[in-house]
Every structure is written in structure tokens, then in C-alpha cells.
Image: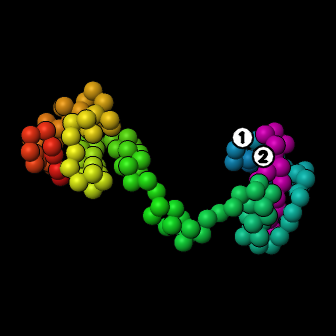
């Protein structure tokens, strides 16, 4: 098998093609082209080598596993919690993320802290968390998971 780095004739984006096939479909725009009619910039028997050439051509620098873990470890815990809360589709999951996140970050939290994230639903959210024993009231108006 042989692979090549080429540019789509329609959308002009660089892509990898399998030169052993008669036709190739662009993964970006869906345009099908005959392989023998495509101008190939780089060829190799190794798909990995062609991927590396594509990465260099598009200035993409992949992060290795250690760099990814370091970025995650250094991430802001508050914005990470807000992101997880906003992307959770389960209401119970949202409450747990909110309660555990605020407790971990602040120790204890208030209605205003919940309001920053949940907006108008803060009162209902705190009430539901109390009813489900997700949080408890440490003192009047101060909560903890």
C-alpha cells in the first residue's frame, strides 16, 4: 500500500489519500476524485509518515500524553467545573458536579456562588440538592456537599 499527501480540488484542504484505490473522497467536503488525477505532494509506504507530513504542512503540533496530563492538571478548576456543568445533560449530574465542585474549590458555598453558574435556577437547584441530600446546610445560607 502507498499513501500520499494531496490537496482537495474543491475545498483546497490538504488530506491523506490511499494511492492503491481508484478514487478518493475528501473527508471535508465529500468531493470524489480519481486517484490518478490528483496531484500528490508527498508519497510514502507508511501512513504514519504521511500523517507526520500532513501535521508539518498544517503546522499542527500534537501534544504527547505527558503534556496533555500537565495541561489538565494545570487547568483552572472553576472553569473546568463550569464547563462540565454546562455540558452535562442529566439534571442530577449537574447538581452533583455543582455541589462537589463548589465544595472542593471554596470549602463552603452560598446561593450567590450557585447563582453565578445556574443563573435564575439557583434557588430551585439548591432546594433540589437539599431535598436529595446532595448538599447540607452548614449554617444559615451556607452549604457544603
Q: Which of 93 and 2 is in front in this view?
A: 93
Left or right relative to 68: residue 101: left
The answer to whether residue 44 is visible is yes
Cα–Cα gap, marks 2 and 1: 9 Å
SS assignment at label 1: loop
Left or right relative to 69: residue 63: right
Q: Give the range drawn in magenta.
A: 1-19
Image point (25%, 35%), residue name: 112
Residue located beneath label 2 in the image: 13
Q: Specify which label sits upstream in the sequence, 2 or 1.
A: 2
Q: Which of 68 and 7 is in front in this view?
A: 68
Left or right relative to 62: residue 108: left
Q: Which of 70 and 10 is in front in this view?
A: 70
> At which x and y percent is residue 136?
10, 48
> At which x and y percent is residue 71?
52, 62
Whether residues under marks 2 and 1 lie with C-beta atoms below 8 angstroms apart, the answer is yes
Image mark for residue 106:
none
10 Å neighbourhood of mark 1: few (<14), some, or many (≥20)? few
The answer to whether residue 1 is visible is no
Q: Does residue 141 sit above or below 136 in this rendering?
A: above
Image mark for residue 29:
1
> At which x and y percent is residue 45?
80, 72
Image point (15%, 43%), residue name: 142
Say which quadrant the N terminus sits in: bottom right
Image point (76%, 41%), residue name: 31
Q: How many labels does the image show?
A: 2
SS assignment at label 2: loop
Image point (32%, 35%), residue name: 116
Q: Does residue 82 sit above or below 116 in this rendering?
A: below
Whether the magenta-drawn stretch holds residue 15 is answered as: yes
Quarter residue 48 falls in: bottom right
Amino acid at each position: 500500500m502507498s499513501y500520499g499527501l494531496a490537496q482537495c480540488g474543491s475545498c483546497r484542504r490538504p488530506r491523506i489519500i490511499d494511492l492503491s484505490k481508484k478514487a478518493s473522497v475528501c473527508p471535508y467536503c465529500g468531493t470524489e476524485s480519481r486517484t490518478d488525477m490528483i496531484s500528490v505532494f508527498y508519497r510514502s509506504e507508511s501512513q504514519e509518515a504521511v500523517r507526520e507530513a500532513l501535521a508539518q504542512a498544517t503546522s499542527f503540533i500534537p501534544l504527547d500524553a505527558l503534556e496533555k496530563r500537565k495541561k489538565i492538571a494545570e487547568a483552572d478548576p472553576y472553569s473546568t467545573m463550569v464547563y462540565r456543568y454546562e455540558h452535562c445533560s442529566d439534571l442530577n449530574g449537574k447538581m452533583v458536579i455543582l455541589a462537589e465542585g463548589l465544595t472542593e474549590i471554596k470549602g463552603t458555598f452560598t446561593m450567590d456562588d450557585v447563582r453565578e453558574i445556574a443563573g435564575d435556577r439557583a434557588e430551585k437547584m439548591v432546594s433540589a440538592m437539599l431535598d436529595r441530600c446532595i448538599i447540607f446546610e452548614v449554617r444559615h445560607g451556607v452549604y457544603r456537599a
